[in-house]
Amino acid sequence: MLGFIVRRLPFWVREPLLIVVGSVFGVRIMYLAVSERSWQGAGIGALFLVFTAVRVHTVVKALRARRKPEPALSATKAMAGITAPPQPQPPPQPQPPSHPHPQPPSQPVAQRRPGSAAGPAAPEKEPSMWGQVVAALVACAALAAALWGLPQLMESGGERAPEPVACPEASHEALPKAYEKTPRPVTGDQLCHALYRPDLAGLLGSPGETATAASGSSGTAPLTDEKVARPQAQVSFPTYTVNVSATYNKLSTSAYVKLLKYGNDQDIKTFKVLGRPAFLSSERTMEFRVDFGSTGSTGGSNTGPPARTLSVALAPEDHGGYYEITVWSESGALPDDGALIAIAEKVIPKAGGHTDH
């Protein structure tokens, strides 16, 4: 299809266009072949340059033919008339008498219309050579700009910053029965919208970062036979990942601290946040691995990077239940404890939901 279109172009448009395309591609391929030391690429580039040289020779030949003057037709006729000698005329022969016959009236000679089949055809006006040259130069310039600008456009498109993510819309699926038995519980999408704040990256100490993922789910706490509501939300950045959950059980924060200390966890700090009992603790994340290789192994679990968790009671009276804000990173680095407190002071009031038993 492209070859058919090229063949239909006028000579003074087609040939300069082929010269520009051949030279641009030939020089570009030769440059890449030299930089990468590829003989095959050098051969392809040489073919383009040879093709370009042939087209240049064709254009030069056509220009020389246009500049050469054509011999005048009148001079040829004049030379033919000089060489023709006069011929002797024979004596007139006597004509026998004949009876006169009436001659039919002469018919008027039909005038020839200009442009009729009988007359000579008017010569076609040939397009201006300079007009075709200007059109060819414009087309070549546009093509060259496209060839050189397309790679930069594709590279700039590839380096474009990713679009910011968003929390999922509220699900219309029925919540677990544990939510029906819990007074004013929050849902996963409510926690996600409360956590995914414009200043969240700044609170974590990494301003300017854009979230790469945001999610929320309305599930139940493990090992409770789906009787304890536990919604959660998570927002990930290139540096840190933040997870917020609300557990609606009867366990108070004071009992929770005793349970952790009984498990030999001594890195615990207790204080108050928003007038509610709270404490900070450290733990290791779990890393799960699934292997579908031919070795027959099904994978397993392993300890992941360290995480820092801030637990805040659902209500100042601390009758049971708590929020948990956990931060971790793949590199193992953690933000200051003040970052978790600042996130709790921003997220918990916006989440709303249950505040007292």
Image: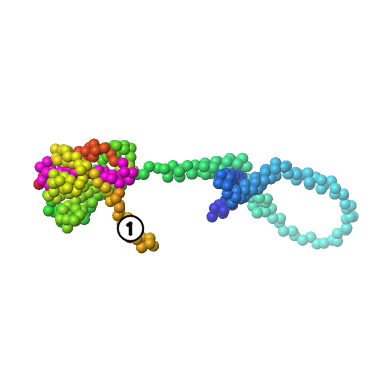
Residue located at (67% from left, 51% from top):
119
Q: Amino acid at mark 1?
A: Gly
Toward the viewer: 279 or 27?
Answer: 279
The residue carrying mark 1 is 299
Picture coordinates of residue 298, whole percent (x, y)? 33, 60
Toward the viewer: 38 or 12?
Answer: 38
Residue located at (75% from left, 45% from top):
73
Quadrant where the N terminus sits is bottom right
Q: Is residue 158 left or right of residue 46?
A: left
Q: Say if 93 sits above or below 68 in the image.
A: below
Picture coordinates of residue 86, whole percent (x, y)? 87, 49
Picture coordinates of residue 312, whole percent (x, y)? 17, 42
Toward the viewer: 297 or 95?
Answer: 297
Q: Could one spot residue 237 in this view of the protein?
A: no
Residue located at (18% from left, 56% from top):
223
Stretch in magenta:
305-333
Quadrant for residue 237, please give it. Answer: top left
How many C-alpha atoms fall within 10 Å of the one at disc 1: few (<14), some, or many (≥20)?
Answer: few
Query: Looking at the image, what colour scheme do you see?
Result: rainbow
Picture coordinates of residue 63, whole percent (x, y)? 67, 43
Q: Is residue 152 left or right of residue 179?
A: right
Q: Say if 94 sits above or below 210 in the image.
A: below
Q: Say if 340 sits above or below 85 in the image.
A: above
Tell me, yes or no, whether the highlighted magenta stretch contains residue 329: yes
Tell me, yes or no, whether the highlighted magenta stretch contains residue 236: no
Q: Is residue 259 left or right of residue 66?
A: left
Q: Secondary structure at mark 1?
A: loop
Toward the viewer: 155 or 216?
Answer: 216
User: How many labels, in total?
Assistant: 1
Q: Could one spot residue 279 in this view of the protein?
A: yes
Residue located at (32% from left, 55% from top):
289
Q: Is residue 63 left or right of residue 352?
A: right
